[in-house]
Image: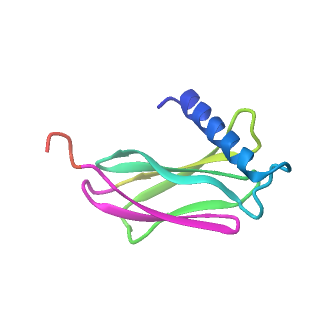
Amino acid sequence: MSNGKLHAVLAILLCLCAAATGANGQAGSTDLILGPYVNQATPSGAKILWVARAGVQAKCELKDTPDASLTTQTSAIPGRAERLHTATVTGLTSGKAYSYVVTCGRDRAQGTFQTPPPAGS
């Protein structure tokens, strides 16, 4: 999915979240606005994405995966104050399940995903 399409989808989802939060536009004490979710999984890597309030410290950790490499990037969402966080994970094994934890300000979310098998298998 291109960045433009991804930003459009995120903008729609954020509008839906904003509509559900009330007149003041605040979601209470929630620092994690959307996600986390896994995207672009390959046999050796994946991207974990989430949306958080601007200015909130956020990080992603893979559990029990010493050989993997994880880099994070934060980007603006056009027309929104929130920020899109992307953790790119490489060095994974195909067909294996992985667990991750995203900490975002006061919020913490965890999930799992499985890398697909190698192409042609």
Q: Residue at x 70, y 40 (%)?
A: 15
Q: Residue at x 70, y 65 (%)?
A: 105
Residue reaching furthest to the left:
121
| Residue 114 lies in the magenta-colored region | yes
Q: Is residue 121 above or below residue 96?
A: above
Q: Residue at x 65, y 36 (%)?
A: 11
Q: How many marks?
A: 0
Q: Residue at x 68, y 37 (%)?
A: 77
Give residue 89's position: percent from left, percent from top.
43, 53
Residue reaching furthest to the right:
24
| Residue 40 lies in the magenta-colored region | no
Left or right placement of residue 37 versus residue 26 in this view: left
Give residue 107's position: percent from left, percent from top.
65, 66
Which quadrant holds residue 69? Answer: bottom left
Q: Is residue 52 above or below residue 19?
A: below
Q: Name the quadrant of the C terminus.
A: top left
Which quadrant holds residue 97? Answer: bottom left
Give residue 32's position: percent from left, percent from top.
66, 58
Magenta residues (range)? 92-116
Give residue 4's position: percent from left, percent from top.
58, 27
Left or right placement of residue 68 versus residue 8 in this view: left
**Nearer to me, 14 or 61:** 14
Residue reaching furthest to the bottom:
64
